[in-house]
Image (spheres, rainbow, N blue to C red):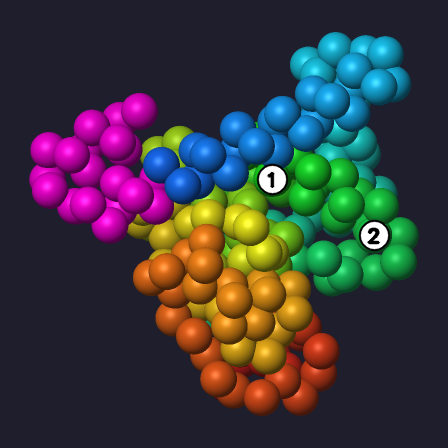
Amino acid sequence: MEKVVNSVTTGDVGSLLRTVGNVAQTIVAQKIEEKIADKIGISPTLLNAGLTGLSIIGNEVAGSRYTDNFQGTGQPGFNGVGNRGPIGAPFDAVDIVLGYQGLPTASTGDYINGSSYATSPTGYSGGVFDANYLVSTGNAVGGNTFAPPFGTVAPGGVNPTIGAYDLVNGGVLGVIPNPTAIINYKPCTAVHFFDGCYGN
């Protein structure tokens, strides 16, 4: 709510619209999760508690997606799906479900408890959810994201970059949920890998 008030008082309409879009995306994801929880006969809170527990186990078993040296930049950031190998894949899926709902993951906690707290993290692919969460809750001053999974809306303070040829973010259609996104037209040399689509 503080971000919305800030956007209104400073006249930053673009940031306000992005923050409202981010909240709407979160509400839609939570409604879907509520229906799933209802179908399996448990409360949404209990389902999310279980997912959070699995996220923590995933970090213990497969490692964190958080790093204080994202892609060799010396800056904090969150890697996406697949960086933890095959053993991390189910835990990546859990983190995505939490992320679409606007909830923190175990990797988000690693950032909050680490030495990079309150800096501007970078998020790539599934790591976009962590960066968005941190900025939208005031735990980071801003952020940069690459390949936001399609349907993800960057809150005010986050600068998204989408790949024109990256199917994860919907290609050029990724500007629909993120109209202020930078479009990277670099041809991907490897399907949806940071270095292949966004790196130098």
Q: Earlier in the sequence, mark 1 or mark 2?
A: 2
Residue 35: where, in percent of width, then height?
A: 74, 22
Residue 94: where, in percent of width, then height?
A: 76, 39
The numbered mark at residue 100 is: 1
How busy is the neighbourhood of tag 1: few (under 14 within 10 Å), some, or many (20 plus)?
many
Is residue 6 covered in magenta?
yes
Residue 105: where, in percent of width, then height?
A: 63, 36
Q: Please tell me whether residue 46 is drawn above or below residue 92 in the rendered image.
A: above
Is residue 132 covered in magenta?
no
Residue 89: where, in percent of width, then height?
A: 83, 52
Q: Amino acid at mark 1?
A: Tyr
* Segment colored magenta: 1-19
Element class at badge 2:
helix
Left or right of 73 in this view: 170: right
Q: Please tell me whether residue 168 is drawn above or below residue 142 in the rendered image.
A: below
Please identify the dominant SS of the magenta region.
helix
Please tell me which residue is depicted at 42% across the width and 49% down the height of the picture: 154
Nearest to the observer: residue 128 or residue 25: 25
- Which residue position holds label 2? 89
Q: Amino acid at mark 2?
A: Ala
